[in-house]
Amino acid sequence: MTSRKHDVANAVEPAKKSSISPADPCTIVIFGASGDLSRRKLVPALYGLAAQNCLARRFAIIGFARTPMTDEAFQQSAVDSVKKFADASTANEGQCKEFAHALAYVAGEYHHPEAFEKLKSRLEELDRAHKLNGNRLFYLATPPEVYPLIIEQLHKAGLAKHPNGKSWVRIVIEKPYGRDLASAQKLNQIVVKSFDEPQVYRIDHYLGKDTVQNLLVLRFGNGIFEPLWNRNYVDHVQITAAETLGVEQRAAFYETAGATRDMIQSHVLQLTSLVAMEPPAAFDATAVRNEKIKILQSIRPFTEESIKSDIVRGQYGPGSTPGNTSLLTGYRKEPGVKPNSTTETYVAAKVQIDNWRWAGVPFYVRTGKRLPNRVTEIAIQFRRAPHLVFRGQNLSTNTLALNIQPDEGISISFHAKLPGQEMKLKTVTMDFSYQKEFGGGERSAYATLINDCMRGDATLFDRADGVEAAWALVNPILESFEAHKPRFPNYAAGTWGPHEADKLLERDDRHWRKP
Ligand code: BG6
């Protein structure tokens, strides 16, 4: 098993990435293989791994879905998705054809035992033909309603346990992992009936982003930041996950989810945990996840009162984005959305972490669709200098901004003297850009995480108690949203969300950064 330490070292020197020894031979089964996630993300990520020699020489991929399809049709659809969605720097006609040869397809209903028997014999046949040692990775990329069916059928078919003492079986479960605390707990119970916890990889693709992992490197791989990373020096933290896209064709899912379930419970709380956690004893799954969960447990639980004062929800109405004056449809007129929908497409919250490091340092988080820029950013806002010796200068505070996407990098702002006779100061920034330092190319978060799973490294995946702790935090918010109907829409597409979100900070004498 390769440790994460090794992977992080390679993240700094990307040229070495392909020199990682390939994972064990195995079969990867994608449930929901005819769906969007598989087409856009999983198949291109697997191709990327094959192209970088991170998959073992011997591997097989089985697509499983309800849509009837031949092996050849699945192979062709994989070639098409690689061409359309894979990182252009890895696209290679010959390699792509070779990759497609390793693909097979099984059509079946998720509740039909016969379909899983068919899957089992296909797995055994491929195992024998390619000497895959019985190693299997099951990836659940279906709508979440069918997760319990698949898990049960895998168990009944005897596929949840290792076929022999030397092989491994792992299951990757996509988000959303439940839709509230009770359903997440129920899903965990179903999962552990068939799989042991170390076999289970609950995925949040944000953790596969290099820039998110780099947050840990910045904090724990350098001596200069960590001493400042606490209530003595930090005034507050802002986390923004803004999207320009609207709901697109995903109304069926989004109408039942909303921004709180879709983004806050998962990605935003993951980022919060990584910013706030204590240094882990080691960079391994147990130590990192133990520290992350302590943060979730230290976040002050939301009450009816604090939900009213510290959380703002919004839904976009019609509007336009800067630089494009054509009218964008309001959420309620998007295809598949109810005309009187109360689903929130924006959430801002003031999160308080009650521990020694962060007491009194608010974390302001916000996420929304149809905002002016696509940007995910973490800003550490430092306290003002204790005494201003440069009289008459209105100095802003120092900010360390971690740009998770799309202009991946880190910048720190500070003050410098303007050239000239007078003592005039100006805020300047020092920037580190991933693009400039390491070159371009889209790094696939999914490839990183699938690779980790094949190596048995669960550091960047969620544990059962982790997802439950996150749901426990958002549960009261969901209940309150359900009980109190909002006045929507309350922000125009292409703006930074409802005015109340600005007031959330203004009342504390602070402002959102303009990312
Ligand atoms: C997904 C959400 O998990 O993350 C989407 O379901 C959202 O609604 C997406 O658009 C954002 O991911 P990324 O990587 O594009 O920031």
Image: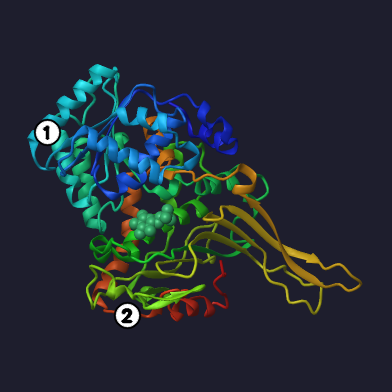
Q: Secondary structure at mark 2?
A: loop
State the image coordinates of residue 147 (x, y, percent, origin top left): 20, 46
Rendering colour mode: rainbow
- The disc labelled 1 sits on which kind of residue? Lys
Q: Quadrant of the N terminus?
A: top left
Task: Work out which residue is located at the far front of the displayed protein and give it.
Answer: 93
State the image coordinates of residue 416 (x, y, percent, origin top left): 79, 64
Q: Quadrant of the C terminus?
A: bottom right
- Quick one: 41 or 379, which is closer to the camera? 41
State the image coordinates of residue 96 (x, y, percent, origin top left): 38, 32
Q: Residues within 10 Å of mark 2 (few under 14, many from 20)?
A: some
Looking at the image, can residue 452 be seen? Answer: no
Q: Quadrant of residue 39?
A: top left
Q: Residue at x 26, y 57 (%)?
A: 181
Q: Quadrant of residue 472?
A: bottom left
Residue labelled with disc 2: 488
Q: Earlier in the sequence, mark 2 or mark 1?
A: 1
Rendered-image quarter of ligand 1 = bottom left
Q: Secondary structure at mark 1?
A: helix
Task: Work out which residue is located at the far right of the displayed protein and give it.
Answer: 421
> Which label belongs to residue 156?
1
